[in-house]
Image (tube, rainbow, N blue to C red):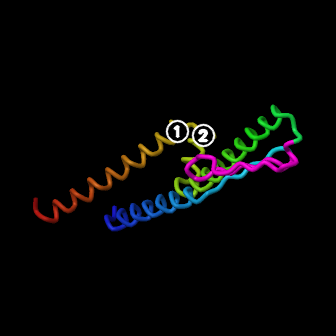
Amino acid sequence: MDPDRMVEDALRQMRAVEDFQARAAAMVGRGEALGGLVTAEARGDGGLSAITIDPRAMRTPAQDLGDATLAAARAALEDLQQQTMAAMQDVVGDEVMDALTGKTDPTKLMAEAEQKFRMSADDALAELDKLRRQGGY
């Protein structure tokens, strides 16, 4: 177990999280309805930032126009969510994303992580024991 490598790994992971946060904040999800006559945009904070209704859509019955506006907004939020999940996958990896999205059993992932942790802890204890013996303690 190399402490320098552990620090490098932690710093790399922190940079990846910071990069993800910056990318997520800059993302824009887009959606449309009524053949593009109604469009919506959602920003990285999860809120809607724009809804545009083409004047030709005003001929549409009010209920249908309202439904189309909701559909465009939902599509924009879904697009943003897909972009966010793709960016998150770059940070956490395929295994974690599969567990988060239900593609794999999260208990299996946790068991594997626990096993890796135990192995790392055993390695660390062995290294400490080695250092203790070398130091005459």
Residue, x 81% and y 38% (percent of image)?
A: 65
Q: Which residues are magenta?
A: 35-58
Give the secondary structure at mark 2: loop
Judging depth in this view, the residue of 51 and 24 nearest the camera is: 51
Residue, x 64% and y 50% (percent of image)?
A: 42
Q: Position of residue 54 (x, y in %)?
A: 82, 50
Check disc 2: other Cα within 10 Å, few if <14, some if 14-19, many if 20+: some
Residue, x 46% and y 40% (percent of image)?
A: 111
Q: Position of residue 8 (x, y in %)?
A: 39, 67
Mark 2 is on which residue type?
A: Thr
- Residue located beneath label 1 in the image: 108
- Which residue is farthest left? 137
Q: Is residue 99 left or right of residue 115?
A: right
Judging depth in this view, the residue of 24 and 59 nearest the camera is: 59
- Residues at marks 1 and 2, CA–CA distance in whole angstroms: 8 Å
Give the secondary structure at mark 1: helix
Judging depth in this view, the residue of 120 and 84 nearest the camera is: 84
**Label 1 with label 2: CB-CB less than 8 Å:** yes
Judging depth in this view, the residue of 71 and 61 nearest the camera is: 61
Residue, x 39% and y 64% (percent of image)?
A: 11
Residue 104, which numbered label? Answer: 2
Tell me where residue 5 sits by quadrant. bottom left
Mark 1 is on which residue type?
A: Lys
